[in-house]
Amino acid sequence: MNHHCDPNTKILVIEDIEEGIVVAKKDIHKGEEITFDYETTEPRLSHPFHCACHGRLIIGKNYHA
């Protein structure tokens, strides 16, 4: 799954469950890429990048430039 600032899914983290659950935030059409916002789950990205959405630097949820 790739990053998007307005993603079509979110990662639901449930206490005591090791892996998150992917939940659709809106209708996802056949062939559409599944995306989520990396900054909602990743404390700090090892390879920050400028997103294609609007060029903002994506670095992690605990680090904002």
Image: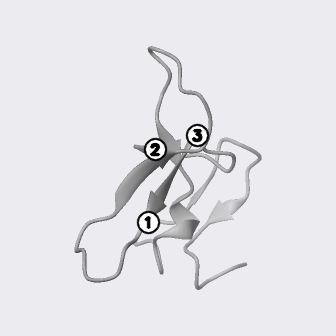
Secondary structure of the residue carrying tag 1 is loop
* Residue type beneath disc 1: His
* Residue type beneath disc 2: Asn
Q: Residue at horizontal 35%, vertical 57%?
A: 21
Q: Where residue 38 sits: x, y (%)?
A: 51, 61
Q: Residue at horizontal 50%, vertical 21%?
A: 32
Which quadrant of the view contains residue 11? bottom left
Q: Where residue 57 sits: x, y (%)?
A: 67, 63
Q: Are marks 3 and 2 in contact (CB under 8 Å)?
A: no
Label 2 Cα neighbours within 10 Å, binned few <14 / some 14-19 / many ≥20: few
Which residue is at the front of the view, 15 or 52?
A: 15
Mark earlier in primary sequence (1, 3): 3
Specify how the rendered protein is coloured: one colour
Label 1 Cα neighbours within 10 Å, binned few <14 / some 14-19 / many ≥20: few
Query: Is 2 above or below relative to 10?
Result: above
Mark earlier in primary sequence (3, 2): 2
CA distance for labels 3 and 2: 11 Å
Q: Nearer the viewer, mark 1 or mark 2?
A: 2
Per the image, the residue denoted by label 3 is: 8
Quarter of the N terminus within the rendering: top left
Query: Is 27 above or below relative to 60?
Result: above
Q: Where residue 25 sits: x, y (%)?
A: 60, 44
Q: Residue at horizontal 59%, vertical 28%?
A: 27
Which residue is at the front of the view, 37 or 24?
A: 24
Query: Is 56 above or below relative to 7?
Result: below
Mark earlier in primary sequence (1, 2): 2
Per the image, the residue denoted by label 1 is: 47
CA distance for labels 1 and 2: 14 Å
Per the image, the residue denoted by label 2 is: 2
Q: Residue at horizontal 58%, vertical 85%?
A: 62
Residue 25 falls left or right of residue 13: right
Label 3 Cα neighbours within 10 Å, binned few <14 / some 14-19 / many ≥20: some
